[in-house]
Amino acid sequence: MGYGPGPVPLGPLQAVLPDELARAAGIDIADARRIVSLVHRTGTLPDRAPATIRRRALDAVRAIGSVPSLELVERRPSALDPFVKYAFRLPDGAVIEAVRIPLEREGRFSACVSSQVGCALACSFCATGRMGLTRNLEAWEIVEQVRALRADLPAPADAKPSGSPRLHGVLFQGMGEPLANTERVIQAIRVLAEPSAQAIDMRNITVCTAGLPAGIRALYREVPAVRLGVSLGSAIPGRRRSLMPIDAAHPLETVLEAAAEHARATGLSPMLAYTLLAGENDSDADADALADLCERFRERAGQGPRLSLIPFNAFQQGGHVRSERLDAFRAIFRARGLGTIVRYSGGGDVDAACGQLAGRGGARAAAPRRAEVAPVSAGD
């Protein structure tokens, strides 16, 4: 391939795919792949071209692109489990959080990443929702969280390649509503899955939403191998709206219709996430309504959802209490032949558990209890 008539300004290279880089810089695709790989492995562009990359190609890329970084503000390992929370300062001074999550298989981890600074949806059981929305993250700021967490993986337990720690998947379940930032999230997913970038199988990437139907449809059209998670709050419409104001604009039934479309188009069952709140959504009637919802979804989508029950994790001014009815709630599902998963939401002592991310300085309202449930699985 020859060099083009002139470079096109490109910006941060962490968010660029090889074919995009080749077109913009007017370079060979092989050089573009090597440069993308170099950026993702080292977080920089070298002053001198390595032997595998032509100098003219590197100079052309340097003229149109940059490799900015996130400042690590805080790294907080949990004393309860192998969860680690990270706080990163963005170039404009805003702070976001990400969590490294251990999986069932030793040495395998997932990265729970943020997609916005704050969140506009104001779900009452989520600390991020109390912040309000500052801005969307750029695609490179999303990708860089994953790159930074991968660079901080623990040392290999032995010299065998099979023993090397590995970042297995990514969860868009940190700060913000991913599908309110759909374009950048989808670009980040493409880069994360690119073999010369982060090389994470799209089937191990999950996007969790409070319920934006247009974004759900964009997901299955643009990145159909990605898994979907939907936060429910309650299966009873009025009760859901009091917990999740987004229900006023996008009622649960319209959200589930989009989720059923996603399931039919991709063949992947969505994860329906349900945070149990004492005296608010944990009664037998709530369980029956949720079981009815799961059965209706099966009829609509041709496959049942995966129901993930989440013990509430306290945060400052949260206003909710963790339910003590988890076992009774699950028993109703078992009696109806429906399965449930109890999510192990670790890192509660460092405010890394589900619903606790709120930027640097978030505080717990009460000390968490360690849940007697299984670790997170790769599909969660």
Image (cartoon, helix red, strand yellow):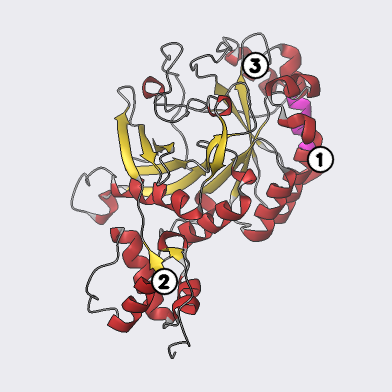
Q: Quadrant of residue 327?
A: top right
Q: Which residue is mark 3?
A: 329
Numbered disc in front, either 3 or 2: 2
Q: Position of residue 300 (x, y in %)?
A: 81, 42
Q: Nearer the viewer, residue 69 or 229?
A: 69
Q: Considering the numbered disc 3 on the image, is that residue within a helix, a strand or a loop?
A: helix
> Which mark, residue 375?
none
Magenta range: 290-297
Lower position in the chain sequence, tag 3 or tag 1: 1
Q: Is residue 74 visible?
A: yes
- Position of 220 with respect to 126 (left or right) is right
> Which mark, residue 64?
2
Find the distance from the CA under tag 3 to the CA under tag 1.
23 Å
Find the distance from the CA under tag 3 to the CA under tag 2.
56 Å
Judge the density around disc 1: few (<14), some (14-19), many (≥20) Cα neighbours within 10 Å: few
> Which mark, residue 299?
1
- In this rendering, the answer to whether 294 lies above or below 335 is below
Judge the density around disc 3: few (<14), some (14-19), many (≥20) Cα neighbours within 10 Å: many
- Position of 320 with respect to 351 (left or right) is right
Per the image, is 179 magenta? no
Amino acid of disc 3: Phe
- In this rendering, the answer to whether 12 lies above or below 236 is below
Most common secondary structure along the magenta stretch: helix
Whether label 1 touches label 2, CB < 8 Å = no
- In this rendering, the answer to whether 221 lies above or below 131 is below
Q: Considering the numbered disc 1 on the image, is that residue within a helix, a strand or a loop?
A: helix
Amino acid of disc 1: Glu
Q: Position of residue 60 (x, y in %)?
A: 37, 78
Residue under the image location 69 percent in, 26 percent down? 244
Residue under the image location 47 percent in, 65 percent down? 16
Numbered disc in front, either 1 or 2: 2
